[in-house]
Amino acid sequence: MRTQIRLLVALAALGSLAGPLASAQSPAPAASAPKTDEAALAAEFDALGEAFEAAQQEYYKKLSALYAPFREREPSAEELVELERKAKELEPLDPTKSFAPRYAALAAKAKGTVVAAKAWLRVVSFGGGGEFTAEGAIAALLAEHLERAELAELASTLAYTQLAPELVRSTLGTLRAKSPHDTVKAAATLSLAVNSQREDVARAKELYRELVAKYAALDAGWGGTYGEIGTRALFELERLQVGMVAPDFEASDENDVKFKVSDYRGKVVVLDFWGFW
């Protein structure tokens, strides 16, 4: 990858030196330069991603080694305190904060391109770093890249975030109202429903119903289509809350004898769901 970057930089430099001579003989098409620039920027983005992945794997290895002795047993109270202290010492090795400024610098360099949008999305996912904040990255994305389909990633990121609720709701509302892409609108609607579910169940149900009505067939990229996700969420909110009658279903016991939950109506029942993933 580094060889590719050097080659692209060398070609770009060669092009700039040959420019005056070439223009004197036969003018090059104006569109060719931006394509070359975007290819170099894309290569730089990929190289930065590879460097981040390597740094992240190194960080995870150290964390894994730290917790390895306790995979088969629980740490004592004293050991837990020591674990937390050592984990704290490893935090500077977490590459998210150190790489956020590098992605922000690339976004500034690539301003107006899809590479800039992807770089700002990385800053948001990292929660910012250095002088660059996630809030600033969101502002840049909405101001300069609102028309891009890549902002579906921003909408999905905001489903679970520590950012201010007002900012999250405002951003998702803007994406729902102004994005030209159904994929972005669907992702924003789902994230807004997830966020609303914590405080306003009625609003969450309304958003899940909208998801099913408008974007049922769209692939969500995980968990099936948006219609399937919305349907499952509505079922949970309407049928699986504390105090509601449990939905009846049939299963088999350890002797392969079939039974229904309703067979035990009026009795205290403990259901133990488990599995391997």
Image: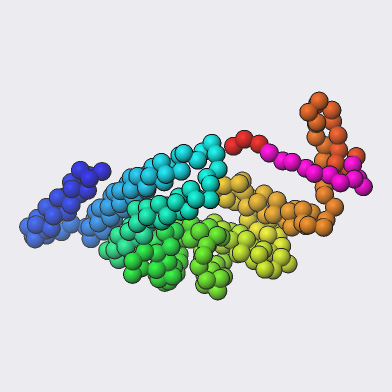
Specify whether residue 271 is painted magenta.
yes
Give the residues drawn in magenta, as a range: 264-274
Q: Main secondary structure of the magenta part?
A: loop
Where, by quadrant of the figure, is residue 243 drawn? Answer: bottom right
Quick one: 81 or 231, which is closer to the camera? 81
**Rendered residue at 18%/48% (across/down):** 6
Q: Is residue 220 visible?
A: yes
Tell me the quadrant of the picture where the C terminus can be found: top right
Q: Residue at x 61, y 64 (%)?
A: 195
Estimate the x, y position of residue 237 in percent, counting from the top left.
74, 57
Task: Return the residue nearer the eye: 25 or 244.
Answer: 244
Q: Residue 4: percent from the left, percent from the top?
A: 22, 44
Total number of numbered labels? 0
Quarter holding the N terminus is top left
Query: For this view, does 151 lie left or right of residue 244?
Result: left
Relative image position of residue 108 (x, y in whole percent): 30, 66
Left or right? Give the position of 11 relative to 257.
left
Residue at horizontal 39 percent and vertical 68 percent from the top: 133
Q: Residue furthest top?
A: 255
Q: How is the image coloured?
A: rainbow
Query: Which residue extends farthest right?
Result: 266
| Residue in the image at 39% along x and 61% along y | 123
Q: Is residue 232 left or right of residue 258?
A: left
Residue 206 x, y percent position in the rendering: 71, 65
Residue 203 visible here: no
Foreground pick, 113 / 34: 113
Left or right: where 228 falls relative to 263? left
